[in-house]
């Protein structure tokens, strides 16, 4: 199943001294990246021929099963989070509104009490001023 292909390497070419002096070699990063990618891809493809079909099928099934279970777990977690957030907002919103209403009623009562105390203090101060005169 393995195919043998002869590839000439650019680095293994013998150059005479005259040609070496005339030409300057420049290596760009793009060319080396492409060569590395092609070499990596060809190595991975070669691994496909080395690994037996039964082992490849088992690895594929394991990876597929792992992906499927992970996806189902994440979907379950998402659904649970949605249910919890929705239920909490439905149950907690009336409680928060009632607490806010109660706090505003207490605040109003405190203001009325302060106003009454201020009026009483003013009345007492007038009464004291009237007695002194």
Image (cartoon, rainbow, N blue to C red):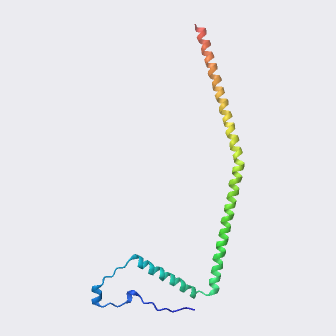
- Quarter of the figure that contains the C terminus: top right
Q: Quadrant of residue 80?
A: bottom right
Place of residue 91 in the rendered image (x, y in percent of width and height, measured from the top left) = 72, 49
Q: Is residue 85 above or below residue 54?
A: above
Q: Is residue 7 left or right of residue 125?
A: left
The one of 86 and 113 positioned closer to us in this rendering: 86
Q: Is residue 101 above or below residue 111?
A: below
Q: Quadrant of residue 105?
A: top right
Q: Is residue 58 left or right of residue 26?
A: right
Tell me which residue sits at (64%, 72%) in the image.
Answer: 67
Tell me which residue sits at (60%, 12%) in the image.
Answer: 128
Tell me which residue sits at (66%, 26%) in the image.
Answer: 113
Place of residue 69 in the rendered image (x, y in percent of width and height, measured from the top left) = 67, 71
- Quarter of the figure that contains the N terminus: bottom right
Q: Quadrant of residue 18?
A: bottom left
Place of residue 74 in the rendered image (x, y in percent of width and height, measured from the top left) = 65, 65
Place of residue 103 in the rendered image (x, y in percent of width and height, measured from the top left) = 67, 37
């Amino acid at each position: 199943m393995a195919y043998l292909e002869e590839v000439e390497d650019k680095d293994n070419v013998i150059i005479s001294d005259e040609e070496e002096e005339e030409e300057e070699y420049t290596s760009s990063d793009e060319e080396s990246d492409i060569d590395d990618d092609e070499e990596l891809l060809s190595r991975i493809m070669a691994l496909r021929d080395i690994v037996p079909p039964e082992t490849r099928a088992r690895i594929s099934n394991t990876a597929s099963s792992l992906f499927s279970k992970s996806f189902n777990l994440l979907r379950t977690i998402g659904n649970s989070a949605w249910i919890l957030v929705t239920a909490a907002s439905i149950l907690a919103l009336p409680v928060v509104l009632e607490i806010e209403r109660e706090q505003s009623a207490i605040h109003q009562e405190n203001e009325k009490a302060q106003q009454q105390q201020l009026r009483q203090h003013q009345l007492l101060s007038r009464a004291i001023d009237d007695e002194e005169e």
